[in-house]
Amino acid sequence: MDIVKEVLEKQQKDLQKYKPITVEKPLEPTIDIGHLLVSDPNYFDEEKLKENREQYVLDVTRDNVQLLINSVWELPTERVEESIVAKLPGPRTVLPRARKLPVPKPLTKWQEFAQAKGIKKRARDKKVYDEVLEKWVPTYGYQRFKAEKERDWVLDVPQNDPYRDMFKEKRDLRIERVAKNEVARMKNIARAKKIATPRTGFVGPDSASAKQLITASNVVKASTASVGVFQESLPNEKQARGIGVKELIPGEKRKKKASTLTGEKRRNIEIVNKVLNKKPKIDIERAISLQKAEARAAREAADDDGDDGERRKKGGKKSKGFSRKKPKGGQGKRNHSKRSVGRKRR
């Protein structure tokens, strides 16, 4: 009988370790199997929560997870590589987005014209054959520029103007094309943001308001390599404000950085590690100089003690440290032709 009793007690203890898979609650939780999400609308038991908060929260979480697992096992299953896999249905709960919905990029003026006329973009070849250089050169990129420089190593100069710099004119034309493309890009951005811009490229006092002139001056100031940091400010200069100004000013757009949760977490961990692993800086040169000064002071103190003992033995009194005579002067005799440099100190 004792053996049977021990077996029954052991079995009872084993059953207490594992709770049943059936869970009963006053209000049925909402289960979204597509998201593996459980929403429990039941209230907390305040008495159990005050007695042992951690155990009570653990029990509630265990019951909700058990309900979710029961719902998963009710789904149709299949075997994939010696594993049983359940087919999850589509999600029902609409989760909020962390960011706004992506907006399609607005078409440029040329893209709208090509779409209206039915013009299709043709893929250009990456390389074309240059008959002058007699080799294949890239269609675009820095290698294309090198090929043009190699091909146009000499240019014709007009006869009526022999001092005309054709290379400078070619370089100015290239810079002008780049500036024209930049103006077109800025106009496309302004048109997409529905910002009124003057018809001409130059914003003058006749075709623009004071607000547009301030915006144009801020754009020009920020269009430098230093983002306008080293630009001199004009007298009574004002900062441009309004909708679409940040997109127009290159400096504001360049300073803006997209922050993500992963990047923020990585930066915080780097800051914490830097603070915790910070070690005091050791100035080796200063430590050596202090050690030398202490050693020098110890030697001088030892020399003073030895000299005092010898002086007391010889004369009975402490003699002066400097017993030699002062150097004599010129004794009234002075050579006026020779420049005097003064007496040397010892």
Image (cartoon, rainbow, N blue to C red):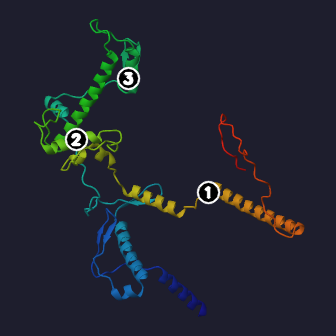
Q: CA distance from mark 1 to mark 3?
A: 53 Å
Q: Residue at x 67, y 60 (%)?
A: 290
In the image, farthest residue toward the front:
332
Residue 148 position in % (x across, y down): 37, 19
Q: Label 3 amino acid?
A: Phe
Question: Is residue 282 at all visible to an observer of this figure?
Answer: yes
Q: Earlier in the sequence, mark 1 or mark 3?
A: 3
Quarter of the rendering containing residue 149: top left
For marks 2 and 1, give the CA distance: 50 Å
Looking at the picture, how far across and down is residue 16, in whole percent? Answer: 48, 83
Identity of the residue drawn at 30% across and 42% down: 232
Relative height, residue 118 to residue 232 (above, below): above
Whether tag 1 and tag 3 are in contact, CB under 8 A, the answer is no
Callout 2, which amino acid? Ser
Query: Against 278, is 160 above or below?
Result: above
Q: Quadrant of residue 281?
A: bottom right
Image location (x, y in percent) of residue 35: 32, 63
Q: Relative to 66, is 319 on the left or the right? A: right
- On residue 217, the disc is 2
Q: Which mark is residue 283?
A: 1
Q: Are marks 2 and 1 in contact (CB under 8 Å)?
A: no
The residue where tag 3 is placed is 145
Question: Which mark is in front, 1 or 3?
Answer: 1
Q: How far across and down, in percent of the image, does residue 304 sit?
A: 79, 64
Say which of 155 and 58 sits in front: 155
- Counting residues from the start of the chain, the first of labels 2 and 1 encountered is 2
